[in-house]
Amino acid sequence: MKRLVGLVAVTCGWHALVEWTERWGTLPFDAERTIPGDGLIASPAMSATRAIVVDVTPDEVFAWFAQMGPGRAGWYSYDRIDNAGVESAREIHPEWVITEPGVSMGSMAGIEFSTAEVAPGRHLVVSLAPSSIMSFSLAYLLEPWGEHSTRVVVRVRGVSNRGRWLDPLIRYLLGPGDFVMVRRQLFGVKERAERIGSARR
């Protein structure tokens, strides 16, 4: 009986933790509202919305996200894990900044990333090339926040292409891992953008 109670407690605790990671940094209405990219995956197994405020304008923030990708600016997260140990860019490279949809952002481990929707200074949606494993979208919504700041709302959605029985694994295992990487990415962009922004003022 004690083991059963312990298992229930652990399960409930993990569920609560996962729910927290799925709304980190957000306002109460963020998780429920529709943002660009939602239509790419109609019934996701995982849908997580996170947010952070960056003290530069939306146009300045957009360039950092629009130059992401393997072989390009990297992901600004844990480079040893997702960028082959190469440090992510610390400057804006105009030749890497994508301003239109349907453009490749590079490939990694046989997975190609591309822009699904792009509105410079407003939003960027990244998706995986068609895969037999899962469908995945990553949307960045940039909202003016005061006179010189930007609120970045990030939404990740994913679903298995090999049966809905894999959905719990996507949400409860891949989801927390995604949180760790995206949270680090957001702080990475914030640090880089604010450093350059403050130097210009």
Image: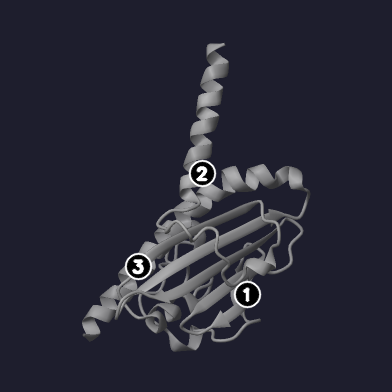
Q: Name the residue carrying label 3.
A: 53
> Quick one: SS at disc 1?
strand
For the residue carrying disc 2, how many other residues have a C-alpha within 10 Å: few (<14), some (14-19), or many (20+)? Answer: some
Task: State the residue at coordinates (49%, 88%).
Answer: 95
Residue 155 in the figure: left or right of residue 45: left
Q: Amino acid at mark 3?
A: Val
Q: Which one is in front, 197 or 88? A: 197
Give the label, 1 or 2, closer to the camera. 2
Q: Name the residue carrying label 1.
A: 114
Q: Amino acid at mark 2?
A: Val
Image x and y of residue 56, in percent? 32, 78
- Looking at marks 3 and 2 on the same chain, the residue that comes earlier in the sequence is marked by 2
Q: Name the residue carrying label 2.
A: 18
Task: State the residue at coordinates (51%, 20%).
Answer: 6
Q: Which mark is residue 161?
A: none
Query: What is the distance, in whole Å, between disc 3 and disc 2 at their CAs?
Result: 22 Å
Q: Which one is in front, 10 or 130? A: 10
Query: What is the distance, in whole Å, between disc 1 and disc 2 at their CAs?
Result: 27 Å
